[in-house]
Amino acid sequence: MSMNFDVCVIGAGPGGYVAAIRSAQLGYKTVVIEREYLGGVCLNVGCIPSKAMIAAAHFLHKTQHEAPKMGFEGTEGIKVNMSKLKNWKQSVCDKMSGGVSQLLKGNKVEVISGEASFKTVNELSVKTKNGDKTITAKYFVIATGSRPIEIPGFKPDEKDILTSTGALDLEKVPQKIVTIGGGYIGLEISSYLQKLGSEVTVLEAGGALLKGSADAECVKVVERKLKKSGVKVHTSAFAKSYKKQGNKLLVTAEIKGKLETVEADKILLTVGRRPNSDQLNIKAVGIKVNESGFVQINPQCRTNIPHIFAIGDIAGQPMLAHKASHEGVLVAEVIAGHNRVYDAKTVPAVIFTDPEIASAGWTEEQCKQNGHHELKIGKFPFAANGRAVAILETDGFIKIIADEKTHIVLGVHIVGPEASNLISEAVLGIEMGVRLEDLALSIHPHPTLGETMMEVAEAALGHAVHVINKPLTGAPRANA
Ligand code: FAD
Ligand code: NAI
């Protein structure tokens, strides 16, 4: 059976479903082909289930450890019913994925369940439950995402060796777990499992956790808290092999040059993700892929074949859902002839550890690499913010980096409560070329965590009110 469309989107993750909806809004006859689940990795086995489990574990931790400080009694006996927790998590994912289905239907996007593969650059073959279909279209958008990287000796089976998918769907809280890889996924999942009661050991091959993914000073705060809560963190640690002994897994790792054995019930493998560009016949039909495996695109997300576009994880770093969705809207508008290119000044990044880390713009090092050698830097601790004190979440700080001469903000790095929500003000500011004075002179509501953004700008200008400025410069007010 052959079907013809204006726009054919392959993959219904946050890149693909957004591209399909925008394309239909713009009047194009659109189809989206999905082999597994609407909403992709993000809504089904990524962002949403992980944030649901992290929220549940944080809630438990606050009830057990913080509520007594506020005067509540009897919270010690609280138990985790993993099967109920799992059902609740699944209900969250189903709600979100169901919402995508409704939106696609409401926008008159045709949805085909099946695995797509290019026959030629103008034709796709789709394997469905009811046989093969052939799809032709004027434009194709590849949005087929990524999958976990594997390392020798640790083949994921989702029983002993878990990927994030297995770790977000556990029947029982493991007593002991070894996490290989101290990046985004490793630390988010380790934090939640530790709060649910697991003994966690993190083996990170690099010299530091989250190296290159976050401001090093912010990472230190998270690392300190992880260690305080009992997580064993090893850097320069390479997992070599494991053997099964009864129900136990014995992991051999070279830690700072010395071979050690760590015992576990489960091993979590989180050493990065790779684009799915080896599938779909992408290379065979002549679509160019770079040396890291990402489909090569231009600033309009167009591949070397002019009517084929690629977006999201398959099209390059950062592999983040909001970047995928941004590109989804962009390609639909490019196809419709709008004057659009990818020109975001910053893609914010959030790591949902405890506390959260969020950043927008450049680190100090990146500012210098980009020619800003003289910088004005301000820092403001959450311990000096009334709202943070009232919610018992005072760990961390906000840091702002601006150009010394122009005071234009170049980067904001937050480690602390609600960093994930606070960062959006910085994103807007950086996109609009905000100066320290703009933030300092904008009245922020009290008492909120958001006041820290105003205070940190004042700190950079040398006149924060709620911390002692060093040196005591008596700098004039921003509008003086
Ligand atoms: P995907 O979401 O991977 O979707 C691709 C879709 O294509 C899939 O549904 C797949 O089934 C389908 N597909 C693939 N091949 C074919 C084919 N041949 N035919 C038909 N369909 C096909 N990002 C954030 O921004 N914030 C977070 O908090 C966050 N948390 C995460 C937590 C975890 C545990 C993981 C694993 C990832 C997380 N991410 C997060 C990353 C985020 O999930 C991805 O960046 C995002 O899903 C990429 O979107 P995408 O549309 O490119 O691809
Ligand atoms: P990652 O790239 O964040 O971290 C992988 C870590 O594993 C690195 O620190 C690396 O040094 C280490 N590593 C590599 N090989 C190793 C080995 N053999 N032994 C020990 N350590 C090793 O990758 P991760 O955590 O798998 O996440 C993949 C991507 O998913 C992220 O880069 C991010 O784009 C996305 N993601 C985003 C989230 C968010 O936005 N909050 C949450 C989860 C994932």
Image (cartoon, grey):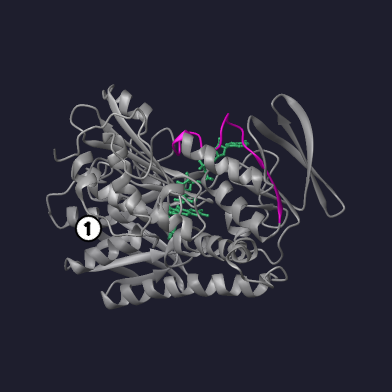
Foreground residue among 138 and 54: 54
Q: Is 429 contained in the magenta span?
A: no
Q: Is residue 60 left or right of residue 441?
A: right
What residue is shown with label 1?
332
Residue 479 found in image quarter: top left
What is the span of residues highlighted in magenta in the rendered image? 198-216
- Give the tally of numbered discs: 1
Residue 434 visible in the shown view: no
Q: Which residue is drawn at 27% across and 33% down?
A: 402
Q: In this view, does 31 lie to the left or right of 351?
A: left
Dot 1 amino acid type: Ala
Q: Using the image, determine if residue 12 lies above or below residue 411.
A: below
Instruction: Name the quadrant containing residue 25.
Output: bottom left
Image quadrant in which you'd find residue 261: top right
**Residue 368 in the image: x percent, y percent?**
32, 24
Residue depicted at 59% across the width and 74% down the height:
87
Quadrant of the frame with the N terminus:
bottom left
**Main SS category, magenta section:** loop
Q: Is residue 444 left or right of residue 399?
A: left
